[in-house]
């Protein structure tokens, strides 16, 4: 009997291991870089919030995120009002966008998506949503064949132009040619800086890590509270389980 | 009817209060019948905790559900935002929501394990057929509950999942399109659909579910529990009429279940607090995008607990229909040649087979996919009459039966896995074989369950003191 269950369990483990990687269809584009986790770094989150409000919020909304929630990352209401409130005048309001959706459609061929939950919805087989965003923001290159003159390796034929190009400067992807099953395929190798930006490549990566950290935090502002509470809950349950185990044993010792 | 009982006015206040109540409501009597003097076999093992756990999860779902409805808005324009409002602005709302979303998956985990227990120890067999049937009805209600609940967050997966499943009903000949319209309340899934699913999810189905759970437990306490040996403990009673191998449910199984509950809660909490999305299996990534009727996702898959059935639905292609027709014809020929029944019945078999094959040729494969998907659940109801083995418990059945059950479980998991994946030819073939095995397992059970050398079950339960 036990043997059968063991075999069964082994079979299940094998199937589940296979399932682990394919819950979601593979997305197109290059492999994602791992984004550094910044959700516990208040300085990085504040810098990310600044970048987000200044660059993203002109076209994208974050309609489920209230400005005053930024107090959770160490800002005061006055600081939020003075530095981050452009599209609205009330700190209790959500991060709506000022752009007219009709114009948006004309300019970009579609409405820029809401970004409140983008760090959650973009997760997939390639990694966490933050990994995608971190890769996406660092994968723009010049492409004269597109309407905006920009293209992106993580999101081929993206409608969004490279808003942060002044910071990053212009970069060019390098490819290796490889033979795969009789076909010549292009394999992405790395980047080459064409024109310098206001930031060095390292500074730009760090700024993007902050911005992505902010978006990750914004996707679920309670995430760090959640983990903190969870540790206590599990410690309690561990103790409770021990007591329940001994209680059970002391009752059952009468049963012969 | 009980006599009115007078007790001494000098008795302690608690005793007098209990006496006052018992003279008006059978509180002590009910507690005795269902807890302190309900005798359960003493040899329950690990597999016997999932019933109590299912009850616990049901309570968690009802309580968290009540709190969610206080802030949720069943309106296509507001639903998605109201869920995010709960996640962000309602104090501890994220906890309530994660408990509810994790609870949905946990419910299916414990219910599947609970059903597997019934399967291997023959818990559905005489005299426990009704317990099993109530249980299957609970499973069906649970599926309806989960399906309709999944629409409520109004994300992309909610929306398109509902769209796909409701469209299946449209495949039913003659009434299909009208039926689908009746379910949706509109020509596409929309506000009307959301409102009626909300009504069903929070009122109608939970009421049915609770009624069925009560019936399930009343039926269980009437006949008493089965056990891993599959022997009746009521055969051996002591002078006072108490089963020799039985122990009072309270306190022995209550402490046992408290222990099980605490272990379960550790796993449950670990998911809620550290991985509430469970890698995209409990909360699908696509569902963090608001529903957009104009943008069909590339890949639509139901949540993991429905995927085995979804696989069977997808397995029924027009090619597969020929395999199914061959099965029907083979069954009819065997019935005519082998069955020891009157000629009239044989004629009926032939007639029914001809009509069925004609229908299978005429009606679209999509409809038969729906029939197969529904049939995969409905067939469970008939299990008590399909199993002809000499003994109840897997412990005393021939070794190859154990392999049969192992393959059955493996097959179910493989079907579930394929239901998550995008379709491909090889996956289609594997899921078709899996579907045939699933149905073969049940439909041929009257024959295969009799074959092999059975061991003799013991007279009394086997039990080693802890």
Image (cartoon, coloured by chain):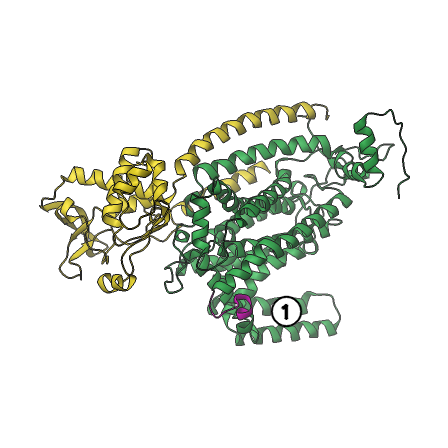
- Nearest to the observer: residue A130 or residue A175: A130
Q: Position of residue B212 (x, y in %)?
A: 68, 52
Q: Position of residue B174 (x, y in %)?
A: 56, 76
Chain letter matching colour green = B
Q: Which chain is yellow?
A: A
| Chain under callout 1 | B
SS for dot 1 = helix
Locate the N terminus of chain B by quadrant.
top right
Going by the image, does B332 lie left or right of B274?
right
Q: Say which quadrant the C terminus of chain B sits in.
A: top right
Q: Residue at x 28, y 64 (%)?
A: A102
- State which region is magenta: B180-189
From this view, report whether residue B44 is shown above or below residue A170. Answer: above
Which residue is labeled 1 in the image? B332
Is residue B391 depicted above or below B237 in this figure? below
At horizontal 60% and vertical 38% (from top left) the residue drawn is A1
Mark 1 nearby-residue class (10 Å; few <14, some 14–19, many ≥20): many
- In front: B315, or B19? B19
Residue A13 visible in the shown view: yes
Side of A183 relative to A228 (left or right) = left
Residue extending furthest toward the left: A195
Q: Is residue B268 magenta?
A: no
Of residues B159 and B349, the one drawn nearer to the viewer in this rendering: B159
Total residue callouts: 1
Residue B90: percent from left, percent from top? 47, 43
Which percent across, then down, holds residue B156?
Answer: 41, 57
Report whether residue B447 is seen: no
């Amino acid at each position: 009997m036990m043997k059968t269950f063991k075999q069964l369990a082994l079979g299940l483990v094998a199937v589940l291991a296979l399932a682990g990687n394919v819950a979601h269809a593979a997305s197109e584009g290059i492999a994602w870089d791992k984004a550094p986790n910044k959700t516990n770094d208040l300085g990085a989150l504040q810098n990310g919030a600044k970048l987000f409000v200044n660059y993203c919020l002109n076209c994208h909304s974050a309609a489920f995120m209230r400005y005053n929630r930024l107090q959770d990352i160490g800002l005061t209401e006055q600081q939020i009002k003075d530095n981050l409130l452009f599209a609205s005048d009330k700190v209790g309001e959500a991060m709506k966008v000022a752009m007219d959706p009709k114009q948006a459609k004309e300019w970009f061929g579609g409405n820029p998506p809401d970004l409140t939950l983008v760090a959650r919805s973009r997760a997939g087989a390639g990694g966490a949503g933050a990994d995608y965003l971190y890769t996406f923001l660092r994968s723009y290159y010049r492409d004269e064949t597109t309407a905006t003159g920009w293209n992106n390796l993580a999101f081929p034929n993206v409608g969004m132009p490279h808003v942060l190009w002044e910071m990053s400067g212009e970069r060019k992807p390098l490819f290796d040619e490889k033979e795969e099953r009789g076909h010549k395929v292009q394999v992405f190798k790395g980047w080459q800086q064409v024109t310098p930006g206001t930031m060095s490549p390292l500074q730009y990566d760090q700024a993007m890590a902050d911005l992505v950290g902010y978006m990750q935090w914004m996707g679920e502002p309670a995430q760090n509270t959640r983990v903190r509470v969870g540790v206590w809950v599990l410690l309690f349950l561990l103790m409770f389980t021990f007591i329940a185990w001994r209680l059970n044993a002391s009752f059952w010792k009468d049963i012969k | 009817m009980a006599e009115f009982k007078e007790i001494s006015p000098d008795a302690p206040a608690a005793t007098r209060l209990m006496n006052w109540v018992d003279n008006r409501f059978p509180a002590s009597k009910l507690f005795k019948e269902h807890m302190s003097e309900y005798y359960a076999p003493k040899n329950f093992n690990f597999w016997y905790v999932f019933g109590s756990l299912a009850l616990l999860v049901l309570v968690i779902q009802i309580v968290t559900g009540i709190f969610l409805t206080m802030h949720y808005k069943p309106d296509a324009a507001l639903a998605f935002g109201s869920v995010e409002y709960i996640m962000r602005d309602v104090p501890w709302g994220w906890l309530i929501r994660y408990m509810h979303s994790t609870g949905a998956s946990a419910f299916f985990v414990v219910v599947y394990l609970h059903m597997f227990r019934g399967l291997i120890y023959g818990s559905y067999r005489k005299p426990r057929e009704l317990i099993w049937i109530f249980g299957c009805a609970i499973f069906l209600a649970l599926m309806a509950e989960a399906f309709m609940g999944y629409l409520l967050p109004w994300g992309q997966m909610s929306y398109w999942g509902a769209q796909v499943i409701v469209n299946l009903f449209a495949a039913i000949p003659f009434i299909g399109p009208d039926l689908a319209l009746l379910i949706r309340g509109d020509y596409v899934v929309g506000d009307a659909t959301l409102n009626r699913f909300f009504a069903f999810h929070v009122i109608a189905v939970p009421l049915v579910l609770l009624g069925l759970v009560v019936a399930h437990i009343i039926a269980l306490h009437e006949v008493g529990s089965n056990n891993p040996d599959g022997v009746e403990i009521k055969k051996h009673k002591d002078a006072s009429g108490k089963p020799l191998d039985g122990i009072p449910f309270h306190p022995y199984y209550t402490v046992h279940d408290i222990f099980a509950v605490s272990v379960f809660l550790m796993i449950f909490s670990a998911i809620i607090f550290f991985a509430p999305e469970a890698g995209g299996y409990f909360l699908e990534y696509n569902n963090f995008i608001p529903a957009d009727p104009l943008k069909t996702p590339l890949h639509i898959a139901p949540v993991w607990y429905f995927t085995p059935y979804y696989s069977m639905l997808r397995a029924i292609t027009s090619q597969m229909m020929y395999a199914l027709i061959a099965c029907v014809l083979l069954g009819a020929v065997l019935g005519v040649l082998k069955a020891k029944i009157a000629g009239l019945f044989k004629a009926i078999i032939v007639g029914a087979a001809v009509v069925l094959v004609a229908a299978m040729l005429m009606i679209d494969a999509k409809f038969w996919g729906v029939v197969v998907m529904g049939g995969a659940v409905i067939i469970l109801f008939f299990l008590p009459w399909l199993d002809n083995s000499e003994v109840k418990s897997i412990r005393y059945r021939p070794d190859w039966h154990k392999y049969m059950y192992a393959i059955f479980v493996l097959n179910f998991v493989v079907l579930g896995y394929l239901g998550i994946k995008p379709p491909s030819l090889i996956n289609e073939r594997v899921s078709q074989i899996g579907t045939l095995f699933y149905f073969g397992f049940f439909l041929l059970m009257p024959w295969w369950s009799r074959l092999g050398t059975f061991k003799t079950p013991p007279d009394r339960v086997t039990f080693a003191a802890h």
